[in-house]
């Protein structure tokens, strides 16, 4: 395990991905530094508490710049190396990402998981839309974050055939399982130092 690597999770919802990441980190002998949410009643807060993980609620009360400044302050206080977005339903500005990149030799080190094979079905409601469209395959995408909506360079994608599922609820559960698998495997790679230094350049060129 790499000493002193500090990871924060940002989430706005129920937090099943956050929970999987916290549990994985604990199984590797570490702790997620903190969970941050913009929603004071998000389910992720209870999950973090149940796993003895620190959490912060940072609501957007005024403008975006002030909100992100508040977040950046926490990131700095905790000297965060990586931010893993897990259902964080808010875009990050180019300024915020640049501020992070300036702290990490030009790499913002923010990753997002999304329940579709991007560029298909970006944004909210991806599962519902893919299911309604009866696509043959959906899947999960892990990608670096830029200022767009689910548009950053893709790290990994795994497909899932819809014919394996009889209902929307089954499909959703299957997609969540796949998300947890991809995300926890990626977390382990970060922790054991398997992300090469030129990783960002290579990924961006894919
Ligand atoms: C997950 O399916 C995640 O991929 C999605 O929100 C859900 C959060 O679930 N994220 C996005 O749609 C980002 N554009 P969770 O709260 O149970 O982890």
Image: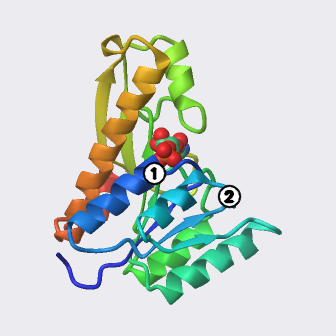
Residue drawn at (55%, 23%) of the image: 128
Query: Pointer 1: what residue?
Result: 152
Dot label at residue 38: none
Outermost residue, bottom direction? 77
Measuring from the top left, give residue 183's x and y in whole percent.
Answer: 32, 51
Q: Quadrant of residue 96?
A: bottom right
Query: Is the residue 64 above or below the residue 174 in the image?
Result: below
In-front residue for pair 115/143: 115
Choose mark 2 or mark 1, whichever is in front.
2
Q: Quadrant of the N terminus?
A: bottom left
Outermost residue, front direction? 50
The Cα–Cα distance between marks 2 and 1, rounded to whole angstroms, is 24 Å
Measuring from the top left, give residue 154's x and y in whole percent.
Answer: 36, 47
Residue drawn at (41%, 65%) of the image: 51
Dot label at residue 39: 2
Q: Quadrant of residue 66?
A: bottom right
In-front residue for pair 61/199: 61
Q: Is residue 12 left or right of residue 150?
A: right
Residue 136 appearing in the image: yes
Q: Is residue 80 left or right of residue 177?
A: right
Measuring from the top left, give residue 74's x and y in whole percent.
Answer: 56, 81
Residue drawn at (30%, 14%) of the image: 164
């Amino acid at each position: 395990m790499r000493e002193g690597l500090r990871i924060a999770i940002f989430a706005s919802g129920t937090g099943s991905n956050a929970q999987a990441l916290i549990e994985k980190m604990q199984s590797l002998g570490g702790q997620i530094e903190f969970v941050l949410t913009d929603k004071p009643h998000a389910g992720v807060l209870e999950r973090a508490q149940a796993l003895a993980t620190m959490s912060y609620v940072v609501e957007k009360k005024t403008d975006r710049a002030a909100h992100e400044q508040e977040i950046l302050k926490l990131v700095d206080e905790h000297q965060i190396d990586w931010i893993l977005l897990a259902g964080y339903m808010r875009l990050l500005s180019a300024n915020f990402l640049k501020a992070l990149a300036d702290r990490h030799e030009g790499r913002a080190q923010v990753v997002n998981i999304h329940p579709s094979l991007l560029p298909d079905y970006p944004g909210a409601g991806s599962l519902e839309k893919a299911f309604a469209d009866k696509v043959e395959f959906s899947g999960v995408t892990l990608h670096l974050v830029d200022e767009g909506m689910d548009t950053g360079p893709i790290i990994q994608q795994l497909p899932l055939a819809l014919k394996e599922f009889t209902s929307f609820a089954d499909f959703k559960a299957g997609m969540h399982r796949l998300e947890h698998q991809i995300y926890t495997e990626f977390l382990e790679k970060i922790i054991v130092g398997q992300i090469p230094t030129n990783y960002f350049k290579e990924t961006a060129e894919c």
